[in-house]
Image (tube, rainbow, N blue to C red):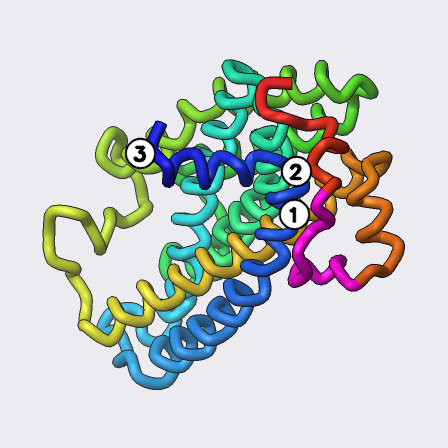
Amino acid sequence: MSADGIRWMKFSSPRNFYFLAGRLAPWFGGAAALFAVIGLYIGFFVAPTDYQQGDSYRIMFIHVPAAWMSMFLYLLLAGYAFINVVWRIKMADVMARSLAPTGAMFTFLALWSGALWGRPTWGTYWVWDARLTSELILLFLYLGYIGLHNAIDDRERAARAASLLAMVGAVNVPIIYFSVQWWNTLHQGASITVTGAPTMAWSMFSAMITMALACWMYSIAVVLVRAQAETLKRERFSTWVREVVGGDGAAGGGTTPPADAGAESGYRVGS
């Protein structure tokens, strides 16, 4: 393994991860706020009125990034679940568990904003469209993962059961993405693709991408903070955690951890 790989592997230690997350989370949170302000301004005040949908289309600047994040975060969750099951890296379970509430929130936001957009566009808040139905199933998968993790007292068994559910549920993500191509649905096709130019005005496109970046930065910041809390909970009997909670100034994540704290971790790689 290269020197860079070894250097990054040290952050699989709960202690090292906790302090790294504490340093990074405020920066990502600030970036999320900045991108959100810029994206909303462009989307609601700069982008032109759509010739067919009027101003009602502007909800897509929230709906589309939320839908993107709902799918991406689930794939990330399933990836961490796979790592936990195969290599038994416990911090992978911490990350998966920290991702689930944020993914569920974005999935709900995508469904809710889609319903508000659908009312003036389709004349109804909800139809059992392939895209909408598969997105609703995604919300149930997130909630099922969270519920299964909390329903089993034994942490190892809970992590394994929830991870298996997450991995099986990953097949729903390509169904969501390709549903508008595989079935005849009311939902419009993608306006932004990897291979083609966007079929929208540049101001609309820039607002969409900026809001997507805001969602990315927000997700990273919130997941890091939640993973910090989960790490403290799991490592609560370690010396370094007692020192952090005891008010030595490290709780904010900006202080170098104690030199002798590394041996106290109960969640080493492969443990």
Rendered location of residue 128, percent (x, y):
45, 37
Q: Could you tell me if residue 165 is visible in this image?
A: no
Instruction: Identify the residue under disc 2.
Output: 14
Q: Amino acid at mark 1?
A: Tyr
Q: Does label 1 or label 3 sit earlier along the sequence?
A: 1
Residue for point 39% across, 48% down? 68
Which range is magenta?
A: 249-259
Rendered location of residue 229, percent (x, y):
73, 47
Residue for point 50% across, 23% down? 83
Instruction: Identify the residue under disc 1.
Output: 18
Within the magenta stretch, is there residue 257? yes
Query: Horizontally, is 176 left or right of 267 in the view?
Result: left
Instruction: Identify the residue under disc 3.
Output: 179
Determine whether the residue tagged by mark 2 lies in a helix, strand or loop: helix
Q: Quadrant of residue 26?
A: bottom right
| Residues at discs 2 and 1 in contact (Cβ within 8 Å) | yes
Per the model, the C-alpha gap separating discs 3 and 2 is 40 Å
Residue for point 77% across, 43% down? 232
| Residues at discs 1 and 3 in contact (Cβ within 8 Å) | no
Query: Compared to 14, does 1 lie above or below?
Result: above
Q: Residues within 10 Å of mark 3 (few under 14, many from 20)?
A: many
Determine whether the residue tagged by mark 1 lies in a helix, strand or loop: helix
